[in-house]
Image: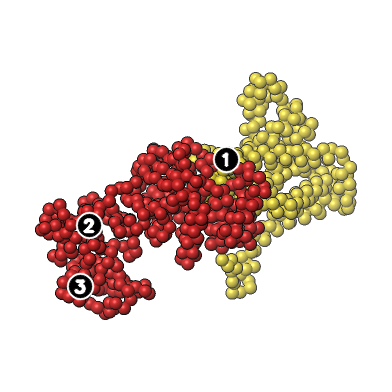
Chain colours: A red, B yellow
């Protein structure tokens, strides 16, 4: 077991493309750290640099107090689960799991014991003699996990391990990965583009964009206090609404003339300053009174327990989420009450969070 | 995926097969059966009388001591050519598979020798190994080897093996490279993380995954060494010196074409055919089992 520390890690490809632009990150021993971001944000590259599959153009990667920049992947004492599982097609499930141990000269009896134990934990004992191609996607995924855990490595690396599974299996494996990681207590770094996976799995959530870290924090932290507009719209489903607003006199904020409170957040900003107002769809409620944000419903999406109402307020598009049946489906024009505590403000120029709750780039 | 095609009429599938069947019949079964028929005949030197002599040609063939020598020579030659061409091609392909600067140029250049006709390749190597003028011969003399393939049978054999293997390396290289590139990168990366160093990675992961390609090439190369090296041997040594480089296929050619012993030559053809068919069958029976597809 070990902590992982990245210091100003960079990756510049031969063509001059900078995929990772100086990332610093501390991952505590035993933590489950999830790197999330859209494709091309550098999250996989960063993981592969930790694994040793990509050279490091700048900065240092430290695993358990040892800088591993110049150390071969085989010597880093890590295990990795790949998106396509990368099982050895010519070996049985048993041989697949035993391969890493054999390479390290583990005695045969111990290999058998360890593979047996991993197979029991993952419930793949009946398949030990089979070849990978005779297994279903979920079973292959388990074998890939088994191959990682038999080695008892210092760090687990996961590169989008669930993206090739169907939706139901994905949810099931997600829970299993979380349970297994808790049980084994091995430091884990997990890359995904799925924000639900990211929220549910992580102790430490790292949101990346354009080769840089946007925000680091606990999942709740990132959800409640997104540090940038990018994080606000990336984390959460459906994404946060961003509406153009202005700071009215006395520090209050209004959207197209409708005051939305949040006076203390906008304190210190001059009247007339444009801001972006972030409102999560579930924080918007219909109000009976004449006050509130006008909202015209265009169409409704059914999610079962809840409904999504797509519509407009003035020129801007807006989505609200409400428990099914609370708002009549044929509702035309509505008014929305806004809880000042649920308002997020962002600087239109930099995209950064504005106001008292703004958090720094905690690393 | 269902690979079966459904045809409306009965005629169309046969019509589609016809060209392939015709080609095989005309260019393989017909000459092969002619050879079998001819191997039972004895013709006088002027072609005026032909007798049906049953197995006399075969009896005569197997009673000659030098025929067994030719077989031994063929075995040595074919083994050497196959081993050399396969192993060198594999080494080159493994190198080309890595990301090297100028990799495409390197690959293209390696493919060229395959486009060279056997006789031309033979001539090329004759020049290089010519005892008094050849570049390689001079080099060998420089390091104290009394190089003379015109007189020394071992030298002549080395030379034809090199020339024959060199011709085939390009072909093998292409297939090996394609095979290597079909192996998923992540499997090799997984092996690296699993603690396998490059050499071990090659033998435990890459080579087994390459085995279908290797098996196919083994069959092709053995057939090549047995049959298609005639041109190289003819231009370089004509089977000499002292029949040191006379292989079965060259002997078929020299006895039949040059020695005008058509019956004996045909009998040899049949024997050669049987040997190659048997070898291929053995390979499919025993080697293929160890191959993972």
Residue A91 in the image: x percent, y percent?
Answer: 63, 53
**Residue pictured at 34% horizontal, 48% vertical:** A213
Q: Is residue B74 left or right of residue B44?
A: left
Q: Is residue B216 something that shows in the picture?
A: no
Q: Name the residue under label 2.
A: A345
Residue B179 % position (x, y): 58, 48
* Depth check, front residue: B230 or A350: A350
Residue toward you, B136 or A264: A264
Image side of residue B291 versus residue B61, left or right: left
Q: Which chain carries label 1?
A: B
Judging from the image, what secondary structure is the residue with disc 1 in? helix
Q: In which quarter of the image is residue A336?
A: bottom left
Residue B130 image label: none
- Residue B155 percent location from the top left of the image: 72, 29
Q: Of residues A41 and A129, which is closer to you in this image?
A: A129
Q: Quadrant of residue A313?
A: bottom left
> Disc 3 sits on a residue from what chain?
A
Q: Residue A335 carries which label?
A: 3
Mark 1 to mark 2 CA distance (whole Å): 54 Å
* Distance between the alpha carbons at the discs numbered 3 and 1: 67 Å
Which numbered circle lies on residue B198?
Answer: 1
Q: Is residue A238 left or right of residue B202?
A: left
Q: Which of marks 3 and 1 is in front?
A: 3
Alpha-carbon span between mark 2 and mark 3:
21 Å
Marks 1, 2: nearer the viewer: 2
Report the chain holding disc 2.
A
Contact (CB < 8 A) between labels 3 and 1?
Answer: no
Left/right placement of residue B56 relative to residue A177 reads right
Q: Which residue is drawn at 63% across and 26% down?
A: B136
Q: Name the N-terminal-most of marks 2 and 3.
A: 3
């Amino acid at each position: 077991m070990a902590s992982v520390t990245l210091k100003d890690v960079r990756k510049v490809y031969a063509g001059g493309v900078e995929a990772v632009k100086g990332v610093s990150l501390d991952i505590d021993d035993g933590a489950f750290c999830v790197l999330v971001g859209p494709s091309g944000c550098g999250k996989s590259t960063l993981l592969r640099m930790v694994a040793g599959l990509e050279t490091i153009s700048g900065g240092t990667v430290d695993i358990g107090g040892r800088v591993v920049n110049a150390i071969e992947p085989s010597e880093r004492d890590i295990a990795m689960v790949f998106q396509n599982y990368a099982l050895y097609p010519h070996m049985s499930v048993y041989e697949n799991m035993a391969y890493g141990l054999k390479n390290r000269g583990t005695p045969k009896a111990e290999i058998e014991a360890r593979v047996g134990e991993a197979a029991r934990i993952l419930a793949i004992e009946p398949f030990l003699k089979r070849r990978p191609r005779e297994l279903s996607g979920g079973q292959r995924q388990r074998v890939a996990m088994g191959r990682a855990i038999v080695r008892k490595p210092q760090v687990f690396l996961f590169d989008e391990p669930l993206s090739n599974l169907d939706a139901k299996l994905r949810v099931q494996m997600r829970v299993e990965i979380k349970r297994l990681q808790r049980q084994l207590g091995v430091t884990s770094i997990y890359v995904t583009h799925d924000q639900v996976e990211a929220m549910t799995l992580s102790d430490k959530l790292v949101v990346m964009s354009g080769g840089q870290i946007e925000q680091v924090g606990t999942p709740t932290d990132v959800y409640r206090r997104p540090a940038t507009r990018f994080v606000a719209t990336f984390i959460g489903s459906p994404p946060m609404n961003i509406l153009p607003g202005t700071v009215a006199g006395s520090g209050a904020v209004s959207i197209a003339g409708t005051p939305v409170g949040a006076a203390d957040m906008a304190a210190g900003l001059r009247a007339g300053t444009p801001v972006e107002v972030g409102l999560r769809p579930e924080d918007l409620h219909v109000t009976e009174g004449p006050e509130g944000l006008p909202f015209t419903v265009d169409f409704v999406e059914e999610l079962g327990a809840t409904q999504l109402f797509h519509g407009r307020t003035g020129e801007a598009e807006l989505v609200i989420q409400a428990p099914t049946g609370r708002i009549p489906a044929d509702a035309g024009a509505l008014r929305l009450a806004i809880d000042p505590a649920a308002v997020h403000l962002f600087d239109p120029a930099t995209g950064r969070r504005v106001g008292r709750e703004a958090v720094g780039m905690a690393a | 995926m269902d690979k079966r095609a459904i045809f409306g009429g009965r005629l169309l599938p046969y019509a589609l097969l016809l060209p392939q069947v015709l080609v095989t019949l005309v260019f393989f079964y017909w000459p092969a059966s002619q050879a079998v028929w001819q191997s039972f005949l004895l013709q006088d030197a002027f072609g005026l009388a032909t007798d049906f002599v049953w197995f006399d040609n075969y009896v005569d063939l197997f009673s000659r001591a030098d025929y067994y020598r030719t077989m031994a020579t063929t075995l040595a030659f074919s083994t050497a050519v196959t081993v050399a061409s396969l192993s060198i091609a594999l080494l080159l392909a493994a190198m080309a598979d890595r990301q090297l600067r100028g990799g495409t140029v390197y690959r293209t250049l390696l493919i060229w020798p395959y486009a060279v006709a056997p006789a031309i390749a033979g001539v090329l190597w004759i020049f290089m190994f010519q005892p008094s003028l050849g570049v390689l011969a001079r080099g060998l003399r420089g390091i104290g080897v009394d190089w003379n393939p015109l007189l020394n049978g071992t030298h002549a054999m080395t030379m034809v093996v090199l020339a024959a293997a060199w011709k085939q390396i390009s072909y093998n290289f292409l297939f090996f490279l394609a095979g290597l590139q079909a192996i998923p990168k992540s499997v090799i990366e997984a092996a690296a993380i699993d603690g396998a160093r490059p050499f071990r990675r090659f033998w435990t992961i890459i080579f087994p995954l390459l085995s279908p390609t290797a098996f196919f090439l083994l069959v092709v190369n053995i057939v090549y060494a047995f049959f298609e090296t005639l041109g190289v041997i003819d231009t370089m040594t004509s089977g000499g010196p002292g029949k040191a480089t006379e292989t079965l296929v060259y002997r078929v050619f020299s006895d039949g074409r040059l020695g005008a012993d058509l019956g004996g030559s045909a009998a040899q053809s049949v024997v050669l055919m049987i040997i190659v068919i048997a070898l291929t069958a053995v390979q499919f029976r025993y080697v293929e089992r160890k191959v993972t597809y």
